[in-house]
Amino acid sequence: MTPSASLKRIALIPGDGIGSEVTQEARKVLESLATKGSLPLETTTFDWGAEKFLREGVTLPEGALDMLRSEFDAIFIGALGDPRVPSNRHAADILLGIRFGLDLYVNQRPVKLLDARFCPLKNRGERDVNFVVFRENTEGNYVGLGGNFKKGTADEVAIQEDLNTRKGVERILVYAFEHAQRHRLTRICMADKSNALPYGHGLWRRTFEDVRARYPEIEARHVYADTVAMEMVRDPAQFQVIVTSNMLGDILSDLGAALLGGLGLSPSANIHPGKISMFEPVHGSAPAIAGKQVANPMAALLTAGMMIEHLGFPKEAGRIEELVKEALANDRVTPDLGGTLRTREVGDWICGRL
Ligand code: ATP
């Protein structure tokens, strides 16, 4: 940290289910770093989620995006989703409202194995599983374009469009190449299905050819997404950076999470370079285990690490990762990883080591 580092204001949205339990631990670790003076940070908590929606009918409050933009440096979100709201309307409004509203076009999901014992692959260690998936976050099949005709009848027709723009594809590809350059990585793989989707993914393929020409020092390959899935299991060490579309990124990064030991260890960031960004563990609200203090907070802690690294504190972020690693090595883990610790005990142990 530089002595002149300015105060960073974090909006915390714990959300639903295990979201609030794991966010509590992330807050503890962040505040611990702040109290020790190594991180000038202040958190403000917002109660947006199912409870508020059921009570007041409010999802993302009026003016929320402007407020986040003008008053905060980053957003940390736990998870959204509650069986009492079967449509999950509040989750879509809040999560997609922020993602689309703040134009957070980069979804960054590191696939970095911290402890080989939790990798389901045979004879693979930390050196074999260490790459990052960049998923386009604002386009593709997830924009909600489409409709049903003759819904609920035997003649029903459903259309779900896959939206791809030159601007949208180019900016995520450029971000991935820039990331590789900044981190001295030498290999990028672009995954698509341009063989089966010649229009939408043909655009990805052509844009990739244009962008890669600007980075001759980086070895850039195009590989069909189904092959990428297979190769991630067969030989993950070949990957450093994978860049892909919204839906394919969703799927491939969950496969990545499995390589690390599961959702309890998988962090993510939603970024718009130079503007406010949002950080969230990959897992959802897991209603089945909510309220029991058995959720693994490590994904949330690693996500907090990604957030402070993004805000300019790589040393403190590295410290969080080191301590998560140490907790794994010492079996200070929750039941999903075979341990007996409760959510808050993992957070306490890590805070104690700070
Ligand atoms: P949502 O509808 O919010 O996505 P979900 O339960 O369908 O919730 P996830 O929350 O992503 O989906 O999780 C699926 C399962 O993975 C959970 O039921 C739980 O068993 C496990 N899981 C996810 N996150 C964690 C965690 N942090 N710690 C322990 N187990 C987890």
Image (tube, rainbow, N blue to C red):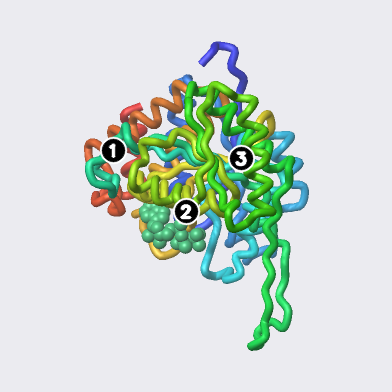
Would you name the residue on which mark 1 appears?
115
For badge 3, the amino acid type reads: Val
| The disc label shown at residue 150, or none | none
Residue 239 falls left or right of residue 165 = left
- Count of numbered labels shown in the rendering: 3
The percent coordinates of residue 302 (x first, y second) are: 43, 37
Residue shown at the point (23%, 46%) measured from the top left: 122
| The disc label shown at residue 226, or none | 2
Would you name the residue on which mark 3 appears?
106
Q: Label 3: how many residues lie within 10 Å, few (<14), some (14-19) or many (20+)?
A: many
Whether residue 1 is visible: yes
The percent coordinates of residue 138 (x first, y second) are: 67, 48
- The mark that comes first in sequence, 3 or 1, is 3
In what element is the residue under mark 1? loop
Q: Looking at this view, is 306 or 227 the one in front? A: 227
Q: Looking at this view, is 33 or 286 the one in front? A: 286
For badge 2, the amino acid type reads: Asp
In what element is the residue under mark 3? strand
The percent coordinates of residue 13 (x first, y second) are: 57, 47
Residue 130 falls left or right of residue 171 = left
Whether residue 297 is visible: no
Q: Residue furthest top?
A: 3
CA–CA distance between discs 3 and 1? Answer: 27 Å
CA–CA distance between discs 3 and 2? Answer: 22 Å
The percent coordinates of residue 214 (x first, y second) are: 64, 25
